[in-house]
Amino acid sequence: MSYKIRVNGTEHTVDAEGDTPLLWVLRDILGMTGTKFGCGIAQCGACTVQLNGAPTRSCMLPLQSVGEMEITTIEGIGTTELGQRVQNAWLSHDVPQCGYCQGGQILAASALLRQTPHPTDAQVDAAMAGNLCRCGTYLRIRAAIKDVSDQLKHAG
């Protein structure tokens, strides 16, 4: 079956079964390999993308459920000012170690900061819960998010 989806501002027509997880459509059909397969049961966050700005696990989301929603992947988040700020903060705080989870982490963090520009530590922890980092850079992740939050305060 053929589906039209909008990814990072570009419309794509994909031929796939409706129950194909969005993760595999992105990786195998569209060649966007920044979104990673982690656990396959929506528990680790490596497959996180944004649907209409909300962080969503793509490994369990059937293609047929996407409809008209805008999909943002790690390949597209840097085209926004906020996404660039988050990516730059990630680098300045040396967050990436192995890097496997970072796409999902960045998409979750940018969604949080778009909704709550000045989050408390508890809000950061809640928003990032379920995005696992095997390298244990959670304190750096929180510092990077707080850095972007401070930038947003000063930007007005």
Image: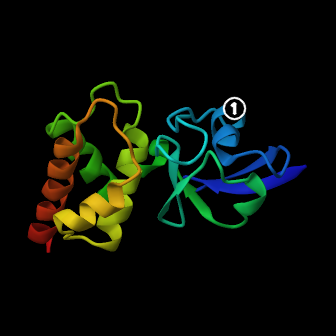
Between 101 and 111, the one lying in front of the other is 101
88 relative to 156, above or below: above
Q: Residue at x 33, y 24 (%)?
A: 98
Residue under the image location 27 percent in, 59 percent down: 125
Res 110 quadrant in image: bottom left
From the viewer's perspective, is residue 119 above or below residue 27?
Answer: below
Q: Say which residue label 1 marks.
A: 28
Give the x, y percent position of residue 21: 71, 46
Front-most of residues 40 and 33: 40
Residue 77, placed above or below residue 82: above
Query: Does any portion of residue 22 appear in the rendered image?
Result: yes
Where's residue 93, x and y in %? 15, 39
Amino acid type at image mark 1: Asp
Q: Position of residue 94 (x, y in %)?
A: 18, 33
Q: Is residue 73 left or right of residue 15?
A: left
64 lies above or below 106: below
